[in-house]
Structures are given as structure tokens and as C-alpha cells.
Amino acid sequence: MEYEYRRGSNVAQAARNINDVYGANTTNKRTTCFWFARFRSGNFHLKNEPHGRPKTLDDNDELKAIVEADDTQSTAELAAAFDVSIKTILVHLRLIGKVKMLDKWVPHEFNDRQCEIRVETCLALLNRYTNEGIFNRIVTCREKWILFDNRKRSASWLDPGSAPK
């Protein structure tokens, strides 16, 4: 096929010539097209790329120990540590009985002073609205709103039935 490519033959001519020389059904247009595309990209190596089943995780005990040492690691971090795919990590986490749970939000109890500060702030904002108006301060650009939410809710890998942090 490389010879036919370097001769300048098109895909159909190359497939026909190869079948004439080496016998009918030696190649077809689809296979010849694949090789010509490969040659056009500059790849003239005849070796196949490694393929097969993806790597698996050999030791679930090691994964369990790492997850229990730091249960906030993401699946991407675990996959990179074990040099496997994220799907493989998810399967093995399920095998060792770990589930991902978001940490709970614990309501914060305010003391009297904090409640007073909040009431004062709300009253100041309400007065500001009635006196100055806030609609002239809203800035838009092409009718798109941008919301910046910097809260991060962490998640942990826990045993089923255990309470989140």
C-alpha cells in the first residue's frame, strides 16, 4: 500500500492493483483508504499501536487504605495515582463498598450580637433602597448575568450508612 501511495495512485486504483497482484479479496477500498489517510498524516510506521483491555486495579486493599487515609480524594486523583481509568476506580470503589457523600451543611447558630449586626445591615440596605434606589446600579452587558459562587462543598468516600461529615 505504501508503494501505491508513493506512486500517486488513488484509493480505488491502489486496491485494484494490490488485488491483481496478490489475489482477489486481499484488500478492499476501506482498508486502503485507512492506510492512505495514515500515510497522508506522515505516519509510515507499520506497527500497530498497543491496544486491548484497559489496565485493571490489582489490589483493592491498597485502594481501600488510600481512600480511608484521605476520603476527600477525587476519582481523577485516584485514577492518576493507580494509572488506571476513572471508570476502573469507580468500579473498584463500589467493590470495596465505598459511596460518595457530600458533607452536610451545619447551620451556624448566631449569638445576640451577630443577630443585631444582621438586622442593622438589613435595615441599612432597606434605607439605601428607599432613599437612593438600586436599579441604576445594576450593570449588564449583552443581557448576560455572571454569578460568582465560590463555595465549595466537599465530598468524601464513605461506607454506606455512615454519616457524612
Image: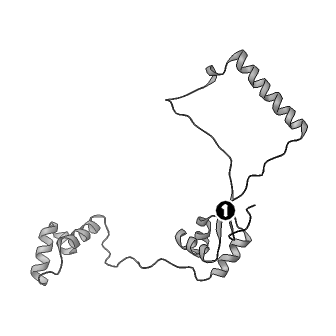
Residue 75 in the image, given as x and y percentages of width and height: 60, 66
Numbered disc 1: secondary structure: strand
Residue 111 in the image, given as x and y percentages of width and height: 89, 41
Most distant residue in the front direction = 161
Name the residue nearer the viewer: 55 or 97: 97
Q: How is the image coloured?
A: one colour
Marks counted in the figure total 1
Most distant residue in the top direction = 131
Residue 149 in the image, given as x and y percentages of width and height: 65, 43
Tell me what residue is drawn at x 17 percent, y 81 percent: 26
Q: Is residue 56 left or right of residue 154?
A: left
Quadrant of res 4: bottom left
Image position of 39 with respect to 117: above or below: below
Tell me what residue is drawn at x 70 percent, y 77 percent: 65
Image position of 140 with respect to 155: above or below: above
Quadrant the N terminus occupies: bottom left
Residue type, label 1:
Met
Image position of 76 with respect to 15: above or below: above
Q: Is residue 24 left or right of residue 98?
A: left
Q: Is residue 3 left or right of residue 148?
A: left
Tell me what residue is drawn at x 85 percent, y 36 percent: 115
Mark 1 closeness class: few <14, some 14–19, many ≥20 residues within 10 Å: some
Residue 52 in the image, given as x and y percentages of width and height: 42, 79
Quadrant of res 47: bottom left
Tell me what residue is drawn at x 68 percent, y 47 percent: 151
Q: Is residue 149 left or right of residue 140?
A: right
Quadrant of res 5: bottom left
**Residue labelled with disc 1:** 101
Quadrant the C terminus occupies: bottom right
Name the residue nearer the viewer: 142 or 16: 142
Image position of 30 with respect to 106: above or below: below
Most distant residue in the left direction = 20
